[in-house]
Amino acid sequence: MQCKNNSTIDDCRAVLIHKFDCRLSSIALRALLVVLSLFIAFCFQQEMGWAQESPFGIAPEQAVSVENLAPWLTDIPLKTRRTGFLPEENEIYYRVLGYASSANPEQVKIAANEFLKERWKQSKYSKRPFEEFPVYVDMYLDPEAYQGRPVIMSGHLQRTVISDAGKNEHGVDQLCEAWLYTDDSQSNPTVVLSTSFPEGMPIGEQAIDHVTVTGYIYRMYTYEARDTGRFAPVLMANHIQWTPPQAKNSSDYSLLQIIFIFGLLLGVSLFIALMLQQRWLVKREQERIAQSLLEEEPPKF
């Protein structure tokens, strides 16, 4: 760069140094922006990776969708001759139960309805209304298709039990177990496992009606019944809905009760009317007899 005639060498040097400093500042600023962009991208990637992980520390490659937990269940047997739960499945048992209890109930319900509707359309029961689809029967005949999938089942509970959970890293503090019987399962149960029961629900051996359970099918549970091994589906509950019986008000009467009360009141009214009529007739007869006696016997002076 040429300096003007009226500029000294020092002035030119100062201008050059200033422009060089400006260029360095521009380069430094660009480098800073690049570093900042890379840092933001790294943080975003980490955040997305965390969001895809289960809240219970499951690696991203093991992540599952709310519609299907089957990828987690490939290493456990669908059926086994050994009763109860196996010690070697302890980690996956608590993992699935922890996930099921923490998943969004509305999303699980939607996924369960979609899955069951697909099963209904492909089954021999498709000519019946969807509400009459025998979920238990279809699941018992084809348990592999249900393993890890969300379902909705309604019926009554028996044998509700609460116990402390074993050592686990999936946030499960207690185990709530119940046996669910549906209309199509007859005397065959579905083992329901949850981390909590609805508030106020009785615990024990008594039957509990009006129960609907939404959750994931884990595997078939082996139990002894009449000296023989039987299988029951295990349902890891996401949500248990229970409608408690309502206390009857004085106005809550059945038709038979109303007819009985009406008949009783009518009978009592007729009885009272007959008694009053009888008294009136007796009194009238007494007056008639007294009048006739007065007419027959003349007065004495």
Image (spheres, helix red, strand yellow):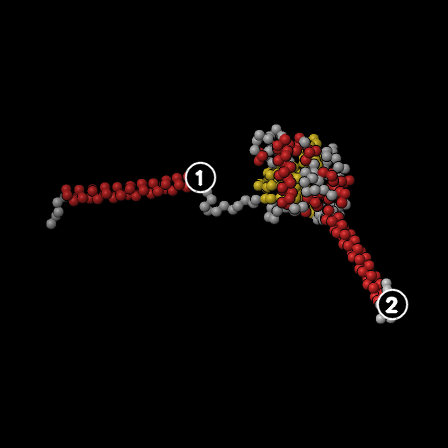
Q: Residues within 10 Å of mark 2 (few under 14, many from 20)?
A: few
* Residue for badge 1: 255
Who is closer to the viewer here, 133 or 160? 133
Q: Residue at x 77, y 40 (%)?
A: 88
Residue furthest to the left in view is 301
- Of badges 2 and 1, nearer the viewer stands 2
Q: Secondary structure at mark 2?
A: helix
The quadrant of the picture occupied by the N terminus is: bottom right
Is 263 left or right of 92, judged from the image as shown?
A: left
* Residue for badge 2: 13
Q: Residues within 10 Å of mark 1 (few under 14, many from 20)?
A: few
Q: Residue at x 16, y 44 (%)?
A: 294
Q: State the CA–CA distance, disc 2 to disc 1.
A: 110 Å
Residue furthest to the top in view is 124
Residue furthest to the front in view is 5
Is 287 left or right of 158, judged from the image as shown?
A: left
Residue furthest to the right in view is 9
Question: In this rendering, does residue 50 appear at all?
Answer: no
Question: Residue 250, how many percent across, how many down?
Answer: 46, 47
Who is closer to the viewer here, 84 or 280? 84
Q: Residue at x 46, y 42 (%)?
A: 253
Question: Residue 115, how many percent across, how many down?
Answer: 64, 37
Question: Residue 93, how many percent across, how many down?
Answer: 73, 42
Give residue 55's mark.
none
Question: In this rendering, does residue 242 appear at all?
Answer: yes
Is 279 left or right of 174, judged from the image as shown?
A: left
Quarter of the rendering containing residue 6:
bottom right
Labels 2 and 1: the sequence-earlier one: 2
Question: Residue 266, how many percent across, how many down?
Answer: 37, 41
Q: Secondary structure at mark 1?
A: helix
**Amino acid type indicated by mark 2:** Arg
**Amino acid type indicated by mark 1:** Leu
